[in-house]
Amino acid sequence: MSARGGRGRLTPYLVGLPGGLWLGIFFVVPILVMLSLSLQSGNAEEGYRFTWAWSNYADAWDFYHVQFVRSIVFGLIVTVLCLVLAYPMAYWIAFYGGRHKSTYLFLILLPFFVSFVIRTASWKFILNDEGFVLGPLKEAGLLPGDFHILATSTAVIGGLTYNYLPFMVLPLYVALERIDPSLVEAAYDLFAIRSQAFRRVVFPLSLPGVFAGVLITFVPVTSDFVNSGILGGTQTTMIGNIIQTEYLTNNQYPLASAMSFMLMAALIIGIFAYARALGTEQVMEVSQA
Amino acid sequence: MTTLASREAPPEVAPAPAVGRRRRWTRLFLPAYTWLMILYFSLPILVMILFGFNDTKGRLNLRWQGFTLNWYRDLFSIPALSTALRNSLLIAVISTIITTVMGTMVGLALGRYRFRGKGAYDLVIFSAISAPELVLGASLLSLFVTVSFVRGFVTIVIAHVVFSLAFVAVTVRARVLGLDPALEEAAQDLGADPWTTFRKITLPLLAPGIVAGGLLAFALSIDDYVVTSFVNGQVETFPIWVYGATRIGVPPQVNVMGTLIFLFGVGIAVSNALLARRQRG
C-alpha cells in the first residue's frame, strides 16, 4: 500500500508530462521566442541579434497603423452584426424549438463540415464580377458594367460575418436555453408587456452568452486574414495579411513578431476592458459554463 | 448535442396583453427568419455541391454550363491537388493519433488529480484554446527560424498537435469529472489491480469523450489553413492548395472533394446522433 502511495503521488506528473512538454516546447517557448525576436535587429542575410530594439514596435505602428485600426474596426462591426443576426435565431430555437432543437443547431453548424477555405472560396465564386449572380444582372442592364462586390470591405465583412456567425449562435443558445421559462411567465403574471419581459428578464439572463459569444467572435475575426485574402483587395488588407507577408515573403521576422505582439496585447487589453465593463461575475459564470 | 435538447420547450405562456401580436412573432416572423438564416448558412455549400456537376470548359468554373459527372471521374487528374489532399489526410491521421493519446493523458491528469503546478497547467490549456491561430502560427514559425529547423511535414504535424491537444484534453477532462468513483472502487474491491481497473473500467467509460476529442482533432487538422500556412515550408496541404487556387480560379475537382468530405462528416455526425438516440431507448 505504501509503495502505491508513493507512486500515486507521481502519477499525475507522469500522465501529464508528455502533453505538458509538448505544449511547453511548442506553445509557451515559441511565444517567448517571438517576444525576444520582436526586440532584435539585423537582417535576413546576416542574422538577428538581441538589442532591445523597441524601434520595431514604433516601425510596425508607423508602417501599418491603417491596417491595424482597420482590423479592429472590422472586428467590432462583424461582432455587432453577428450578435444582431444571431440573437433572434438563438432565442427562437431556445424557447420555441421544441423537439427539433438539435436539428436546428445541426443545420446551423452545417458550414463547419465544409473546409473554411472552401466556404470562403465559394463566396468568392458567388460574388464574382461575372459570376452567376452579378453576370446576368449586368447583362440585363440592372447593374452598371463595372459594379463589383469583391475587393470591397462589404465582401470582407460579409465573409467574416458568415464564417463566424455560428460561433455567436451557440453560446447565445446555451445561455437562453438555461433560462427557466417560469421566470418569463412570472414577468407576464406581473403584467409585463412583451418588450418589458424581454428587456428586464430574458436579456439580462442571457448576458453570459452574449459575453462568451462576443469574445469567441471578436478575437478570431480581428486576427483573420483568410477572408480579406480571398474576398478582399488592396484596400481591405488586415493586420493578419501584413503579418503573414512580413514573415513569409519579406522575412522581416522582428517587425512581424512585433506586430503579432501588438495585436495580442490589443486583444488582451480589449478583453479585460470589456470584462471590467460587464462585471466580473459574468466572466466567472462564463468560465464555469 | 442531445443534451442541449434535453429540456422541453416551455408551454405557451399564460395570457398577457397583446397575445395575438406575440403569437405572430413566435409563430411567423422568428421561424421564417431562422429558416432564412439556415438557407444563408447552406448557400455556399449548395453552390459548392452544384458546381461540382458543372460541365465547365477549362479552369474557370463561373456559370452553369450543363450537367456532367466528369469531375467525379477525373477527381485525381490534378497531381498537385491529389498530393495536397493525401498530405492533409496523412497529417490529420498522424496528428490525431498523437493528440488523442496525449490529450487523454492530460485530461486524466487534470480531471482526476490535484498536484503542484495544476493551476499553471490549466492556464496553459486555456491560453492554447483562446490564443488566435495567427499567434500560434507566427510564434511557432519564430521558433523554427530561430533554431533553423527545416519546415515541412514534421512541423505541420507538430503545429496541428499543439492546437488540437488542448481541445482533446478539455473534452476528456469533462468526461473524467463526470465519472462515478464507485465503479472503480468496486473493481478494486473485487481484486483488480490499478492497471486492470483502468483498462477494464476507466477507459471504456471515458471512450465517448476520447472518440469525440479524436474526431474534433481530425476535423481541426484537416481544415486548418492559418497555422499551417506559417509552418508548411514547401509542403502543400488541401486548404493551402485551395487558398492558392482562389487567385486563378478553383477547379471543379475541389468542389467534388469538398462535397465528399462534407458528406463523410455529415454521415458520421448523423449516425452518431442516431446511435445515441437508440442507446437512450
Image: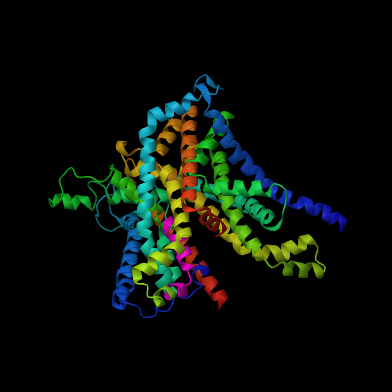
B149 lies left or right of B252: right
**Residue A179: within the magenta?**
yes
**Residue closest to the far left:** A141
Q: Is residue B189 in view?
A: yes
Whether residue B79 appears in this view of the structure is no
Where does the image place residue A210, in percent across and percent down from the top left?
A: 44, 57
The magenta stretch is: A167-185
Which residue shows up at 49% across the image and 39% down it? A264
Where residue A87 sits, quadrant-wise, is: bottom left
What secondary structure prevails in the magenta region?
A: helix
Residue B256 vertical placement versus B193 (above, below): above
Task: Indicate left or right for A287 with B121 as reference.
Answer: left
Which quarter of the figure is the N terminus of chain A placed in?
bottom right
Q: Estimate the x, y position of residue A211 in percent, counting from the top left.
A: 46, 55
Q: Position of residue B31 (x, y in %)?
A: 33, 69
Q: Which residue is drawn at 47% across and 41% down?
A: B134
Q: Which of B246 and A284 is in front in this view?
A: A284
Pick the front one: B203 or A179: A179
